[in-house]
């Protein structure tokens, strides 16, 4: 069977353009792949379109709008997920515009579909006492307990994303007089984040205990599960929730917590941006907007007491009370 123009464009986009020309991460490519897997499932099940005969001529604004509604209504996806799927379709349309200009109108119809507005949730973060209680729970008498504490400590200490943590190799850690860890973030961007002394000391002991100190182990994963393979996202999430007494706390909450604690300690927001690996300062500013305690303290510093010293007690006015009784 001769491949369709849609099949050819999508294959070139996912296998050549994104990894080769754009250099996007594997996780981003997988996310885009999943979007098109869902889209084609919708075309087959909801629109009775044969996937093997699907062409760029069928790829239009009405079909994409129906797909987005299907995600939200039939699958129960959140508006955030809906917008993420739309973003992936938009990116593909920009690619198609240059590869197949004859379908420019279809692409512009899809690109004109805007993201759906929604109320953004408040940022979840932990207080210092809550985090301290969580980090006190791993059993340090066991090897797995020491490893768990180290994973959670590195997550908080560096403000790393889970993908950055599980992607660490031994060579990414430097434990000399100024301990640092090199995190490989989105878009293949690397950044160096200082490690606190206690975390660095735990890392040093962990490397020795795990026999990861020889030069031959530099490209070995820093953190491995019980099978000796690199940790996965669900694996790190499981470790965190194991010590959270049933609370649904995700590893990303530790990243938010680090950012909020730095902000509350008076660290310049520009440094926080660099530690977190944000490209745009506006992304980091969301933490400043979320910290109500800092807002309260800022208001107290400039507060002027303009209210009267006390509210008059009208019940003490005998003549007024008598007048009210006579009125009744």
Image: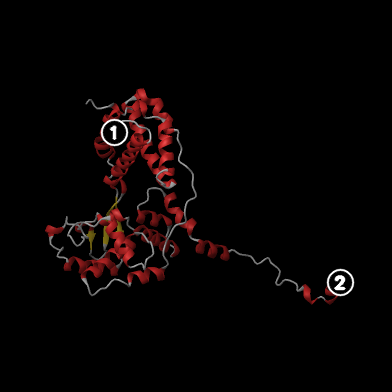
From what the image shows, is residue 49 above or below residue 173? above
Residue at numbered disc 2: 323
Residue 20 drawn at (x, y percent): 24, 37
> In the rendered image of this protein, does residue 50 appear above or below residue 281?
above
Marks 1/2: CA–CA distance: 86 Å
Screen quadrant of the C terminus? bottom right
User: What is the number of callouts on the image?
Assistant: 2
Label 1, residues with CA under 10 Å away: few <14, some 14-19, many ≥20 = some
Give the SS element for disc 1.
Answer: helix
CB within 8 Å, label 1 to label 2: no
Q: Earlier in the sequence, mark 1 or mark 2?
A: 1
The tag on residue 42 is: none
Q: Is residue 154 visible?
A: no
Q: Nearer the viewer, residue 159 or 108?
A: 108
300 sits left or right of 68 in the view: right
Q: Residue furthest top?
A: 102
* Residue placed most toward the observer, 45 or 234: 45
Quadrant placement of the N terminus:
top left
Asked whether 273 or 311 is in front, the reply is: 311
Is residue 171 toward the left or the right of residue 131 in the image? left
Residue under circle 1?
A: 10
Residue 170 in view in this figure:
yes
Residue 18: % across, % down: 28, 38
Q: x and y percent of residue 45 in the render?
A: 35, 36
Instruction: Name the quadrant containing residue 311.
Output: bottom right
């Amino acid at each position: 069977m001769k491949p369709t123009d849609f099949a050819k464009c999508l294959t070139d986009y996912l296998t050549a353009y994104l990894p080769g020309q754009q250099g996007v991460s594997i996780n981003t490519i997988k996310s885009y792949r999943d979007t098109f897997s869902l889209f084609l499932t919708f075309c087959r099940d909801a629109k009775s379109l044969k996937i093997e005969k699907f062409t760029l001529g069928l790829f239009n604004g009405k079909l994409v709008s129906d797909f987005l509604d299907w995600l939200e209504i039939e699958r129960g996806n959140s508006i955030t997920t809906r917008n993420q799927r739309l973003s992936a379709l938009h990116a593909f349309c920009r690619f198609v515009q240059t590869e197949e200009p004859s379908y420019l109108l279809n692409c512009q119809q899809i690109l004109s579909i805007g993201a759906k507005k929604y109320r953004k949730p408040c940022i979840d973060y932990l207080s210092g006492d809550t985090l301290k209680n969580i980090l006190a729970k791993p059993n340090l008498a066991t090897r797995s307990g020491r490893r768990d504490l180290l994973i959670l400590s590195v997550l908080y200490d560096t403000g790393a994303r889970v993908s950055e943590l599980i992607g660490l190799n031994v060579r990414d850690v430097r434990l000399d007089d100024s301990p640092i860890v090199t995190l490989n973030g989105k878009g293949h961007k690397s950044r160096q984040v200082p490690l606190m002394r206690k975390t660095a000391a735990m890392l040093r002991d962990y490397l020795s205990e795990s026999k990861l100190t020889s030069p031959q182990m530099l490209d070995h994963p820093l953190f491995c599960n019980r099978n000796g393979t690199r940790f996965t996202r669900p694996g790190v999430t499981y470790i965190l929730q194991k010590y959270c007494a049933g609370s649904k706390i995700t590893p990303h909450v530790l990243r938010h917590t680090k950012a909020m604690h730095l902000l509350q300690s008076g660290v310049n927001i520009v440094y926080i941006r660099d530690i977190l690996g944000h490209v745009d300062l506006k992304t980091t500013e969301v933490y400043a907007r979320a910290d109500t305690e800092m807002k309260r303290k800022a208001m107290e510093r400039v507060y002027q007491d303009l209210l009267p010293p006390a509210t008059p007690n009208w019940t003490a006015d005998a003549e007024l009370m008598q007048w009210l009784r006579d009125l009744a």
